[in-house]
Image (cartoon, rainbow, N blue to C red):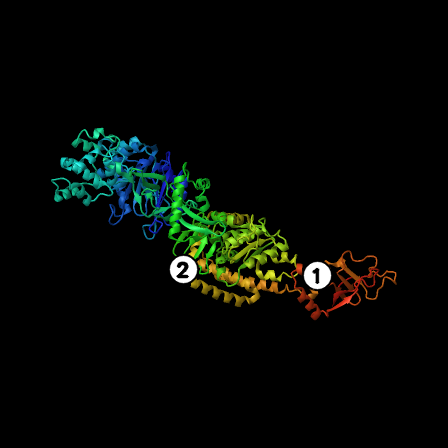
Amino acid sequence: METRLFLDSVLGGEGRYCLFGARKSAPRIVQNFYSSVGELLQAADELNAINYDTYFALGTFDENDSRKATNVLSLSSLFLDLDCGPSKDYATQKDAIIGLQSFCKKLSLPKPTVVNSGRGIHVYWALHEPITPEEWLPVAQCLKSACNLHGLRADPAVTADVARVLRVPNTHNYKTDPPSEVVCMTMGEPVNLDVFYELLGGEELTPPTEIVSSPEDKYAHLESSFKDVLVKSSKGNGCEQIRIALTDKDNVSEPTWRGILSILKASVDGSRDKAHAISKGYSGYSEYETNAKWDNLSPSMPYSCVRFNEHNPDICLKCPHWLKVGSPITLGNRTKEASETTVEAPAASIPTSPITTYTIPAYPKPYFRGVNGGVYLRTTDREGDPIEVNIYHNDLYVVKRINDIETGESIVLRLHLPKDGVKEFTMPLTAVTAKEEFRRQMSMMGVALMRMDDLMQYITTWVNELQASGGATMAHKQFGWVGEDCKSFILGNQEIFADRIEFNPPSNQTIGLMPAFEPKGTLEGWKETINFYNREGFELHQYVVGAGFGSILMKFMGEISCAALHLHSKESGVGKTTALLAALSVWGRPDELLLQERDTYNSKMNRGEVMHNLPLCMDELTNSSGKQLSDIAYQFTSGKQRMRMSGGSNAERYRGEPWNLIAITTGNTSMVELIGTYKSMPKAEAQRIFEVKVKRIFNSSNDKGMTDEFARNLLANCGWAGVIFVQHILNNLDAVKDLIGQVQERVDKLANLVAENRFWSAQVTGSICGLILARQAGLLDFSIEHVFNWAIEEAKGNKLRSDDMGSSAQQILNDYINEHWGNVLWIKSTDDARSKDGTDPLVIAESMPKGKLIARYEVDTKKVYLVPKPLKEWCGKQQINYESLIEDFINDMEGVRGNTRLSKGTHVVLPKSRVIIVKCDLDVKNR
């Protein structure tokens, strides 16, 4: 039966819908409110997916978002809970259903909706329309009485509870092992309330009509100080009955004395010793009698003003507090102080996050936290009377101090909002001491107050106390591993340890990326989505996911700062971009973490510095120039940004620690080939880039729909796996390092990789180890041996292509001459334009080189005379070692250094110049 259909039938009316979740392991409790049944149903699915017992409230609630009976606005059904089990009211569910059928038949009740709760039976009669609690309660009480009268053993605490929660169908009962499904077994038709009331017995059952409120009352957050009552009374602005009694004890009646002791016992500072202290001045004082009176008094029943007046008339009628307070104890009322408190709440920055446990510390004196939250200040006035001021109604406190190398000292604050969860934010200390800036920063975070002075002083008191108690923490300006010992890992606003997760405040560098690491969907949703790649032929895509995991393992790869993986294919729609999204979905929201070709070079390098150990992914580098790609290849693998000046000051820009990561790029063509259009010998870049040509797997329109859905699911379920993966590493760090060594040794041996192939070795090792460890952590189930074999073959292919790139001296010379053809004098060694008619086409008498003369080529002797300076400049642009090239000319091409007149045989007379003479055969006729 559709869960939505069920919820629509038993819920409805104005107000908000409440979802309640609980599970055995922490975090244990979650309770949230929603504006629609659809939102509630989606949230129920999410809680069920992370092993929560999931319940919904049968009533709708007002905007206070509190599941109290007094906050219920309407109900749309009547309900029963039939407990089943060996020690329950019914031994089996079958027995319960038989009892329900007998009950309905006896009273001619319409067919109900029945839900199998996993162990028991939940029964509902949906109403035609929502009704108020006042209309609902008499009928519910009648139903409760009818069950008792006719032997249906329904749980009496459930039937007439307006704020009751029951299990959501299509979830699981995790109290059983294995978990049981909660299933809607039958759906009944809506009933008329009046008709149903009559069928139950109606007026004959005389049910009560008062709605039982929550045991909490409006004074639950208060306590009374007897000392404050005495101080006020002694000054004439408290209780006159108490003042007279304590100044003239022999004339105090026993009821008045007992009343004063009742006030003392109900006060937070009341004690037996104080009872004796205020009683001893009486001439008939008895220790025994005082103890007896004290023991017989209830701490929850202090005497009222009316009762004092009954035993000692006329005095209270003149009191300024008469009829304004109910008891003298209220004159000492003050807010209960909370000590260090643990609360459970969702993080405001992550709407779908599970409940987190927060520790609210004791506030610095004279400030304190109320037992129900809020910031209070308790002092005394000039006359010594206590003054209590509520500074702010929500919990707000300083968590820690941090030092930012660029902005100086800052503080991390935590704000608990009743409907938005918990916000943690950073504020520079300069804002704490500047009123308008403090107001602006607080308002941005949702702290709306007209007077900020008191709150500003409160925060300053916090700062001073923290400065006196310990040092500041350095702000993390990069994500990834912290320190050389790698005891923790920074991921968005989380600092992950082996056994816990702490809040990581943003710094100037990381604040812009913080939202990108907020998880979406569920972990189970991500696992199901990534399993799309778990099939034959998807080894490349599995490998890219492994690179996403394995990027953080580069920290343990020795001196290698970065290894690059480039995916290329002239065809579009082969899954290159989607593979990048899959790799990034491990850590956060892939669409926000993915860099595009249009992003500037500096922004790409800055992202590399901030990501630090997390994968750096860039899509579509096809339009980048060969020079840009060459720069990227060298910059990535250097592990550092270029040194730059800081804007607005004559100082170097801050650079973070060198990065250690895997960079993954895509394009329509080989990155190395594009670099080859810029320089003759891109072999050095080729050694830094592991290239893979992506082949088409899908072709049909059905395939497209499947891949589109996969991409959508990646964006909808992301950011969950990273925390689990990091904690698995932290708890097995030595074993992880051993694994890396073993895998790398095997990779190098099977692919025959040597020292110059070290970048490929690190990248393949990191990607394979990433898959192995992710599988160990229970995150995926790929066939790693297949991926490993695929990677070895790709490494061999990269090695063959790189070995073929070595250019000979002859090839380099050919490239140089071809690029400068118009700057070369082509001539025979015996030609002389001054004595011949110049008809020989090889003699260029009238058509001299079109530009600067850089060489002379004698077509008969097959010798070229090269001018050193332009050759050296060209080698520099091509990143070719000039001196090594000259050595190759001398050793391999009979090259010598000499002097000659380059223009010999022409009408131009030039002096001799130093040249390099090389013997080579150039195809002049076909030019």
- Residue 218 in the image: x percent, y percent? 29, 37
Q: In the figure, is residue 674 to the left or right of 16?
A: right
**Count of numbered circles on the image:** 2
Q: Could you say which disc has been placed on residue 155 in the image?
A: none
Residue 58 in the image: above or below residue 590: above
Q: Amino acid at mark 2?
A: Asn
- What secondary structure is found at the residue carrying circle 2? loop
For the point 12% across and 44% down, the residue is 288
For the point 58% across and 50% down, the residue is 600
Give the quadrant of residue 567: bottom right
The quadrant of the rendering that contains the N terminus is top left
Q: Is mark 2 in CB contact (under 8 Å) with mark 1?
A: no
Q: In the figure, is residue 852 to the left or right of 341?
A: right
Alpha carbon separation for disc pair 2 and 1: 56 Å
Q: Could you say which disc has been placed on residue 731 in the image?
A: 2
Q: Is residue 699 visible?
A: no
For the point 68% across and 61% down, the residue is 875
Q: In the figure, is residue 836 to the left or right of 710?
A: right
- Residue 883 in the image: x percent, y percent? 67, 66
The quadrant of the rendering that contains the C terminus is bottom right
Near-viewer residue (227 or 793): 227
- What secondary structure is found at the residue carrying circle 1? helix
- Residue 234 in the image: x percent, y percent? 23, 36
Q: Amino acid at mark 1?
A: Asp
Residue 871 in the image: above or below residue 513: below
Disc 1 designates what residue? Answer: 815
Farthest front residue in view: 382
- Residue 684 in the image: x percent, y percent? 61, 62
Give the quadrant of residue 263: top left
Among the two numbered marks 2 and 1 on one chain, the one whose residue lies closer to the N terminus: 2
